[in-house]
Image (cartoon, coloured by chain):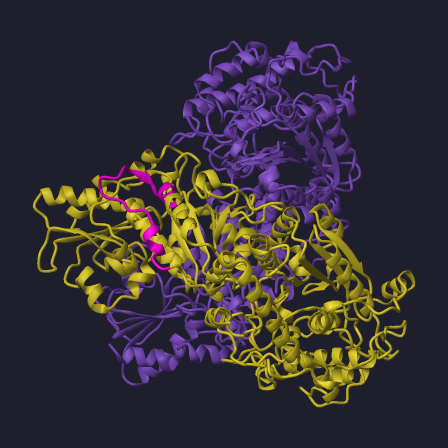
Chain colours: A purple, B yellow
Amino acid sequence: MAALTSITAAQALMGRAIAGDATTQTPSDHLAIPSGFGYSSLSGRALKTSVRQPQQHRVARFHRAVPFRAAAVEMLDGSAATTPLALFEKSVNTIRFLAIDAVEKANSGHPGLPMGCAPTGHILYDEVMRYNPKNPYWFNRDRFVLSAGHGCMLQYALLHLSGYDSVKEEDLKSFRQWGSKTPGHPENFETPGIEVTTGPLGQGVANAVGLALAEKHLAARFNKPDCEIVDHYTYVILGDGCQMEGVSNEASSLAGHWGLGKLIAFYDDNHISIDGDTEIAFTEDVNARFEALGWHTIWVKNGNTGYDEIRAAIKEAKAVKDRPTLIKVTTTIGYGSPNKANSYSVHGSALGAKEVDATRQNLEWPFEPFHVPEDVKSHWSRHVSEGASLEAEWNAKFAEYEKKYPEEAAELKSIISGELPAGWEKALPTYTPESPADATRNLSQQCLNALAKVLPGFLGGSADLASSNMTLLKMFGNFQNTTPEERNLRFGVREHGMGAICNGIVFHTSGLIPYCATFFVFTDYMRAAIRLSALSGGGVIYVMTHDSIGLGEDGPTHQPIEHLVSFRAMPNILMLRPADGTETAGAYKVAVLNRKGPSILALSRQKLPQLPGTSIEGVEKGGYVISDNSSGNKPDLILMGTGSELEIAAKAADELRKEGKTVRVVSLVSWELFDKQSDDYKESVFPSAVTARISIEAGSTLGWEKYVGSKGKAIGIDRFGASAPAGKIYKELGLSVENVIAVAKGF
Amino acid sequence: MAALTSITAAQALMGRAIAGDATTQTPSDHLAIPSGFGYSSLSGRALKTSVRQPQQHRVARFHRAVPFRAAAVEMLDGSAATTPLALFEKSVNTIRFLAIDAVEKANSGHPGLPMGCAPTGHILYDEVMRYNPKNPYWFNRDRFVLSAGHGCMLQYALLHLSGYDSVKEEDLKSFRQWGSKTPGHPENFETPGIEVTTGPLGQGVANAVGLALAEKHLAARFNKPDCEIVDHYTYVILGDGCQMEGVSNEASSLAGHWGLGKLIAFYDDNHISIDGDTEIAFTEDVNARFEALGWHTIWVKNGNTGYDEIRAAIKEAKAVKDRPTLIKVTTTIGYGSPNKANSYSVHGSALGAKEVDATRQNLEWPFEPFHVPEDVKSHWSRHVSEGASLEAEWNAKFAEYEKKYPEEAAELKSIISGELPAGWEKALPTYTPESPADATRNLSQQCLNALAKVLPGFLGGSADLASSNMTLLKMFGNFQNTTPEERNLRFGVREHGMGAICNGIVFHTSGLIPYCATFFVFTDYMRAAIRLSALSGGGVIYVMTHDSIGLGEDGPTHQPIEHLVSFRAMPNILMLRPADGTETAGAYKVAVLNRKGPSILALSRQKLPQLPGTSIEGVEKGGYVISDNSSGNKPDLILMGTGSELEIAAKAADELRKEGKTVRVVSLVSWELFDKQSDDYKESVFPSAVTARISIEAGSTLGWEKYVGSKGKAIGIDRFGASAPAGKIYKELGLSVENVIAVAKGF
């Protein structure tokens, strides 16, 4: 099983997995509870009659309409849900109080959602989901996303109870504190067990669509009738806020279109958002909307105590294999708090000592803060051994798969390992100054297609601009409901959803390398998703064409101006603007290697010549000299530019050299990479003694002071563009050889 | 009628209206066509049988299912649609060929939509809409938005035929050329008659929601049972692309919630987007989704030749007064082109000479490019006089209204005029250094409430963060379906929709001043709308709180870093970051006066002291000295900062002065305003001889080189934030008095 070990090792490497070997443990005796035990209409009896029931009329009506099921519900591995009700509710209340106590100690946080969603969360983590707490990156785990990320104490409590090493008692006690593993919103890069970083609403459900897409794609490519090696569900909890955000509709429309049957979403319908009752702004029929989007929908009308309803809904959702399922779970936010439940005051603030006491009394919770009762602890403890067994079973299955299908197994392993095939970069096309002039978007397509041949996890697409962004992989068909093994993703005109879905694909942590594309200006639509790629370290490749006024007639609505600098200011992202074929190949090399953060390639619509002096090595340094007729590192003038304007700089240099000047031309293809170089290297490119410097770039001049210095000049565009043929706009706005020469003569 | 003249004058001023007095013209004789003429099932007969019918099976089915109505349809003013069919179709084809010819001449553009939507456009502009071509800014005009802005030749053709002076024949011939009035996408600032700038998809329909909101609000405030002085419809055409974008769902959900009954949207269901058939990415049931959003929906199954179906749908939509209506109009993109209709190739490229010829033959169009046949010209010519009559009637109605309701009339006029009431700025609160420390978000609320008392057109709200953004107007209730006269807008968690709706409100050109709010970091969700405010000159006020790591425990997903610089780089927008109460009041003064572009106020969550030396006049200059112990404009050191860090700069200066240094402290509250000052003024603030300069700001340092110079130092944050109490993060990231002093000692 050396092969499998290597997968696990690679995963650990990729995902900073927690070490730990729990396979020697055996299931605890306490699991031997009588099977066949079911739920009765006494569900909810732990709740004292004195509890304020703000949604009483609604809940009461639901009770009448939907009698509780008494039968046991088939769950994980066909076993029945057999936890005694009292223990179940005690365990659910443990989750509630861990959330209450952590928020109270931090005096900051969101207790409302964990208190309301505790039953659903409990059923998911205790009865439904397959995972291994000691290896949060086990490949075939079920994925869970808390799209309503502010409720993160729900997930921290669940990770704690399930046995994840990332959330110990001391972590719960340092909720929202500097350096803790329990930040104010779930952060995948801080807390193993958290799949994706959430908090900015609506994106989590789109991430979940990406996770489910990754599963469906890999399953289609690698599963065999006799061996389903890729086989997990993706669960997501989203709230009213997520539902209101456009990005969730975009992604949900695609999930319906793609028929992602293993995506199961729980809509926490608690009727409260920060501004109060959702009646003031949100009165649409959510389930009807999802039906229109092609989803199966269910309504659990009593999400507070209708545990069997929740279980039955999950069972039903799993039975529907051709569509994703939305389970609307009507809950009471802050359930259990006698005076604050069902109000916005429990959404985002600590309950306060008095109300915490009242809630303890109300839910009959005599324990100290952060206490997990022994029987609850004991109940959950089986997940460590169960998880180890699940992973071991899968490992055995994989060993069998490898024996029967060695080629497929090798390919899957090579994807999962995240290790790029040796020599992959040699596949990138090469260019010489004699190669024909071409738009970098076209050269980009050559790179994408070259990469697709050597990188088995490479897939992506465009937001309905494939033929403009030049992003089609010619050797593959379209990823669709019935052809999920293909690799061209068709996102439709849904930029924000596209970015968030790609984050989901990359955080599937199965080694897939997603790229996505639109016009550079429309990064404005997806900026929130790009920021989450950057913050959470996702190596999504953003292929952004039509990167300046050079797109011409479509006009200022389509012409980026401030976009380059706006991404240069964003942490942990590479903004690359290649000037020709060689630099485009270099940018792809950098982007593919950059697995711990996103890369944006800004590419031209218009044709550009292949410039003498450009190089892949230069791109890797971010900034470098492409030509110079001076000696002793002391040119009269330094001209610098990026992308399509490097040509202008090079031509101006030629003219100025004819007049006897010594001129250096610098390509600054990526500021971030250049800024990381040594001071010596920087001095070799921009000698401090040379203050006559001109930058030229078809975008905002803001920030160029950094390189041209206080005596230099930045030629750029600090206004909106215009609708006209590209050449005309360039000329009118001073992006020309003539203007560079004129400015140069001003020194 | 001097009063009315002043309204018209003010509107002209506001909206760059085209001069012209058409009231002396009389309706042409040709209008005397027999009433009672109707349509028969021969509709569409102008289309030769040889026309390729790619959607034939569908269209054919619809023909069978829905027989054409033969009766005349009641239209504008209860009159019947009485244009003879042959003339109607000739006129529709005129639109098609103006679009074909303009795109062909430019060799760039989008002929497909105009060819497909010509019948709907024709019916709207010729039979349904009330407008005055010679005064595009007539207050009570019906509003039209082409959300699918790439199809702008449709609207240019319609404006041309209707008699707008903004689109003459020479303008059509200079489509997409430098300086023309017919840019590649509709731009309100270039072309009177265009209400809003569109092109970035999905936002137009959200703008339309804002336009309809403005109408409903003003109608509720000013209409009387005996005098409905505000009474117009808002029409919008949106395509598949718009429908896929999340922003359109956000805004449509609100339109349904608000019951905007006078909003009528036409969904051009042509089944084609740039990537091909929408089947590849967009298979949801759009009408069912809109029903779920609370809209009335209709399906016109033959939008190509089912003219009476279109008319009947509009009639039905008008009859439904409690909900907005979506009319799905199934059309053929590029209708009439024998070889390119119903394919993506007709979406965004010129047809090419050969196909233009084929289309001319197919549609039996013998005319030269850009020719408008005399009978068509004559048919449309009545709109100039009709428009003048409509405005004159309304003026008479307003005169009567003014007589009966002088107070209301005065208030409405004061809104429409766009002139701020004399002395309005005196209402802004004042502060002294002795005033209690407070968060600028709270001080902002004092300003908002003060402004609401003196600015009758002031209204706005938050994306579900009213109690965090502190944006409630205490003297008003919520704008809701049944209380549309109120001024607190409740957008729900829909930032992008909120921004685009506010653009619609401001471009209602009725003098309303909208503000909207969320956390500063979530400008990422609405950046595309903010950019359109900037590009198209809309004075929306963006109230952005929680403007830094100072928000504390919510962590890096909620902490802006790169946002200040990203807006400083955006053209035509004011980015303001006030430091205390005085500067907050100053920022509001600037923002209210800035009616030709948006303003963003970045406001703190945390308490800040009222600083000595801050002033409203200083804010108006963008940057100014708040304290200095030097003389002769030659301090040893200049410390500069914005917002919450100005306090740190001031405290550090105090310490350094104790040690004998001469230190100047500069507030750079708005770079844009400062950069507009004279060189002399700039030198008086930043004397070039003083190179020891330090900036401090809790955000990206990118761009600060501009002010600190190459020898200065920028203290800021070039990484993501963290989840912890605010004070702790400030300290850990070096945003402290101690650090400023340490850096200062490095000079």
Depicted A307 relative to depicted A362: above or below: below
Residue in the foreground of this view, choosing between B388 and B400? B400
Residue at the (71%, 32%) spot, across then down: A397
Depicted A590 relative to depicted B38: above or below: above
The quadrant in which residue B282 appears is bottom right
Residue at the (56%, 26%) spot, across then down: A114
Q: Residue A186: image x %, image y %?
A: 51, 34
Residue in the foreground of this view, choosing between B288 and B280? B288
Q: Residue A568: image x %, image y %?
A: 41, 56
Task: Tell me, yes or no, if residue B490 can be seen here.
Answer: yes
Depicted A509 relative to depicted B225: above or below: above
Q: Residue A195: image x %, image y %?
A: 56, 36
Depicted A502 relative to depicted A238: above or below: below
Find the magenta span and give its range.
B422-444
Q: Is residue B639 left or right of residue A543?
A: left
The quadrant in which residue B215 appears is bottom right
Q: Is residue B637 left or right of residue B235?
A: left
Q: Residue A402: image x %, image y %?
A: 70, 38
Task: Tell me, yes or no, if residue B196 can be seen here.
Answer: no
* Magenta span includes B437: yes
The number of callouts visible is 0
Q: What quarter of the picture does the N terminus of chain A occupy?
A: top right
